[in-house]
Image: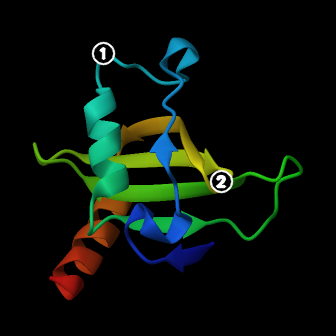
């Protein structure tokens, strides 16, 4: 996996499609607004896997923090114009340590 700069500007995404009808994660625990906060978090860490997908979309992974101080992991795809969140959960302990270490270095 390679590390990417934070922020959605590098993807040139015009809007985010959450596709909440068939969301593969529990929306009772993670709200759509929190997903947007992670994707817009200037301190979020984003990763791109080294393998290419056959459908042309890129799958990214993000570690970020919400305004309410929730630390979340997201997996999302993008075609360069639309981002679709495909997984969301609380960060693991190791992910949280990694995020905190990088956050403290960039502040």
Q: Is residue 17 left or right of residue 89?
A: right
Q: Nearer the viewer, mark 2 or mark 1?
A: 2
Give the Cα distance between marks 2 and 1.
24 Å
Q: Earlier in the sequence, mark 2 or mark 1?
A: 1
SS at badge 2: strand
Residue 47 in the image: above or below residue 24: below
The reply to whether callout 2 and callout 1 are in contact (CB within 8 Å) is no
Q: Specify whether residue 92 is in view.
A: no
At a point 33% along the width and 64% down the height, the residue shown is 44
Residue 65 in the image: above or below residue 42: above
Q: Is residue 57 left or right of residue 71?
A: right
Q: Is residue 63 left or right of residue 20?
A: left
At a point 39% along the width and 38% down the height, the residue shown is 89
Residue reaching furthest to the bottom:
105
Q: Nearer the viewer, residue 82 or 96?
A: 82
Residue 43 in the image: above or below residue 78: below
Residue 54 in the image: above or below residue 90: below
Number of numbered tags placed on the structure image: 2
Res. 99 image quadrant: bottom left
Residue under numbered circle 1: 28
Q: Specify whether residue 72 is in view.
A: yes
SS at badge 1: loop
Task: Classify 10 Å Cα crowding around label 2: few (below 14), some (14-19), many (20 and above).
Answer: many
Residue reaching furthest to the left:
68
Q: Quadrant of the N terminus?
A: bottom right
Q: Quadrant of the C terminus?
A: bottom left
């Amino acid at each position: 996996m390679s590390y990417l700069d934070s922020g959605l500007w590098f993807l040139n995404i015009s809007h985010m499609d959450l596709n909440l009808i068939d969301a593969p994660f529990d929306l009772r625990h993670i709200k759509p607004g929190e997903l947007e906060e992670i994707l817009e978090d200037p301190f979020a860490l984003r990763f791109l896997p080294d393998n290419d997908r056959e459908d042309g979309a890129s799958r990214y992974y993000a570690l970020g923090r919400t305004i309410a101080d929730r630390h979340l992991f997201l997996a999302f795809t993008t075609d360069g114009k639309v981002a679709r969140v495909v997984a969301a959960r609380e960060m693991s302990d190791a992910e949280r340590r990694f995020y905190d270490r990088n956050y403290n270095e960039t502040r």
